Amino acid sequence: MSDISLADFHLTMQVLDHLDAGIVILDKNYNVYAWNTFMQAYSGISTDQIMGKPLFDVVENLPESWLKNKISSTFKLRMRSFSAWEDRPWVFKFSNFSPISGGADFMYQNMTLTPLKSLTGEYTHICLTITDVTDIAKNKNHLRESNEQLTHLSITDRLTQLYNRGHWENCLVEEFEHYQQMHQPMTLVMFDIDHFKNVNDTYGHVAGDAVIKTIADIVRKAKRQSDIAGRYGGEEFGVILPGTTADMTSYFTERLRKKVERANVVVDGKTINVTISLGVCQLHPGITNYESWLEQTDSALYESKNKGRNQTTIMQVNGKFTSLATNVKNINEFNRNIG
């Protein structure tokens, strides 16, 4: 090597060593030809320990299969490729020492892969450039978490932690449109707390809130993951049950009604017991919009109220009501199936 080329090489190595990024140069057999100061500092592996040796024999915890595929495709395409921290948080598992991005155990990294051409014109080596993007990643993750929290707050009823009315009604619209496309069974349940005004008047609004929260917890435990529950307003709740007929929904409503009936809400040493009245309506082609679906379900709920409360009423396709409380056969069946 001439004095000029040696001088150029020396200058180049100084530049590589002072870059605020990791530089690793490999041949096609993954032998290391360059390992700059950044890589030494974060890996704890000196140039003497790694130069001329296969990368994967010396460095632990590398995503070997993934990285080899990345390198192979870069050689084949003969063009630069990129790996972002969003897809793979790190390639080299370096500890994070930045005080600004505290809370991150490992360094988030972007990686650029650049194929290198030899004097013969053949691509014989590849340069991996590792950039520390921990600060950016932490800020972006924090922003995403904040947005998720804001979204949760915007759709959640603060007292019950069920969906609030606005979001629940949006779900009702979406499920109605889904029914029109798929024509799969779908049922709506509306219910409210019997004589709730008396609870507030007798025990106070704090006790009333405790009753509402207790019933919301019962609903959350009783419903399936696919069911959509929300607080419609005051002491009224709604539950959408996709893929469910009215008969199937009856088991849910009676289980819910019995659990509420047995629940004890204790506030300031006083035990409060309440019941609920429920209305059920299965979607059918005769219901032309979600408002009508909601109205018919509410009509079934009011029928439960009119017939003495603490019961479930189903709105039939012909517009008639079926009350579970007056159907002895159903009651016996529920007693056998409800725990």
Image (tube, rainbow, N blue to C red):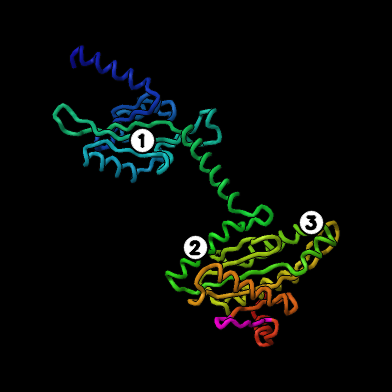
Q: Residue furthest bottom?
A: 329
Q: Considering only vertical position in the picture, is 267 above or below 42?
A: below
| Circle 3: residue type | His
**Residue 212 x/y as whole percent:** 72, 61
**Residue 293 x/y as whole percent:** 56, 71
Tag 3 residue: 205
Badge 3 density bin: few <14, some 14–19, many ≥20, Cα 10 Å? few
Residue drawn at point x = 50 percent, y = 65 percent: 175
Badge 2 density bin: few <14, some 14–19, many ≥20, Cα 10 Å? few
| Circle 1: residue type | Met
Distance from the alpha carbon under mark 2 to that under mark 3: 34 Å
Q: Quadrant of the N terminus?
A: top left
Residue drawn at point x = 69 percent, y = 87 percent: 328
Q: Which residues are magenta?
A: 316-324
Displayed quadrant of residue 64:
top left
| Circle 2: residue type | Glu
> Looking at the image, is mark 1 or mark 2 earlier in the sequence?
1
Tag 2 residue: 174
Residue drawn at point x = 55 percent, y = 48 percent: 151
Of the numbered discs in the image, which one, if any, rests on residue 111?
1
The reply to whether dot 1 and dot 3 touch (C-beta < 8 Å) is: no
The residue tagged with tag 2: helix, strand or loop?
A: helix
Residue drawn at point x = 33 percent, y = 38 percent: 82
